Amino acid sequence: MQTLTTKHPEYINPKLPPRTLSSSKKFEGSSDLVNLRYHMGPVLSSSPINIYLIWYGKWANSQKLLIKDFILSISSTTPSTKTAVSLWWQTVSLYTDQTGANVSRTILIAGEYADHAYSHGNQLTRLSVQQVIASAVKSAPFPVDHKNGIYLILTAPDVTMQDFCRAVCGFHYFTFPSMVGYTLPYAWIGNSAKQCPEVCAYPFAVPGYMGGGGPQALKPPNGDVGVDGMISVIAHELAELSTNPLVNAWYAGEDPTAPTEIGDLCEGLYGTGGGGGYIGQVMKDGGGKTFNMNGRKGRKFLVQWIWSPVLKACAGPNALD
């Protein structure tokens, strides 16, 4: 999908070889070249996983509701369709820690904090984003949630981030006690609508060099190129945060400073047969909008697949086999 990875920006390794994709319908991704291993660290097994949302910059209420509907679709106990977002998360919940405890299948939005005033400026860095978290934690109603918490920083289209568009669309890591006072898992995802939709909101926007001979931009399922694009990156980061919150649990590769995680292994894959720039077989509604998963309140989403430890392949609920 992207010409960059959505992993830890501190540890981007441009020398990693491109991953080979299989032509097999059932096993999207290469099971021969992947050595995903468990490194004895914790996963987010305590239930529920509490997500603390930090809205940085100016956000429309409709955009907030769209993102929150996606997050709340993850732990639906009664999936309405076989392509439900909650069935996608079932793959994440297959990952366990050394005690055999699975990643929790229940996710709640435990708190929200809005910083409309851009209190740390509209040009953030990998370190200053931790100051944004520190400001949120110091304000009510944000607690310090060591055991169950994920802190999700979502930046508006006019906020730049170090390496955004060039090397990352989103990343996750953990806060430094010297910056925040605590070690807390967090992820940052930016709205690329104005800066690089062809990179971070692909396939809802495509690079100009593809022209008429390449793939055409697809209609976003909710009519918002930036936010619809963000949702897949949010999904990617939540899956990796839950299975590798302190960067010492589930990842492939020998270098923990450049881990290849369960989302990285499936970048660009949204359906059966995907690979080599083709997103795979997905669905369209009556208005021609593209999606592969269904959420609450009738929402539709296009979300990338993730690596299954059982199939040893990329998996999603819309698989045709």
Image (cartoon, rainbow, N blue to C red):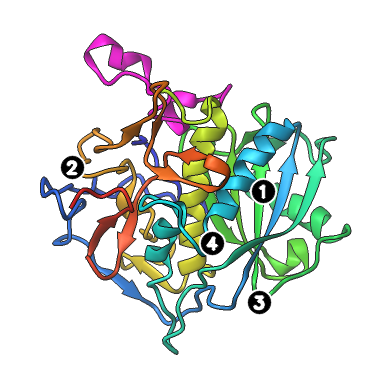
From the image, tell me which residue sits under label 2. 273
Which is nearer the eye, 297 or 132?
Answer: 297
Q: CA distance from mark 1 to mark 2?
A: 33 Å
Who's the residue at 36% across and 14% down the image?
A: 208
Q: Which residue is under mark 3?
A: 147
| Magenta-drawn segment | 193-218
Q: CA distance from mark 4 to mark 1?
A: 21 Å
Q: Are marks 4 and 2 in contact (CB under 8 Å)?
A: no
- Contact (Cβ within 8 Å) of mark 1 with mark 2: no
Which secondary structure, mark 3?
Answer: loop
Q: Residues within 10 Å of mark 4 (few under 14, many from 20)?
A: many
For marks 3 and 4 on the same chain, the one whose residue lies earlier in the sequence: 4
Q: Nearer the viewer, mark 4 or mark 2?
A: 4
Q: Which of disc 2 and disc 1 is earlier in sequence?
A: 1
Asked where in the image residue 252 lies, by quadrant, the reply is bottom left
The x, y position of residue 77, in whole percent, is: 51, 64
Report the mark closest to the observer, 3 or 4. Answer: 4
For label 1, the crowd category at 10 Å Cα-Cα, with few meaning under 14, some 14 to 19 and many 20 or more, is many
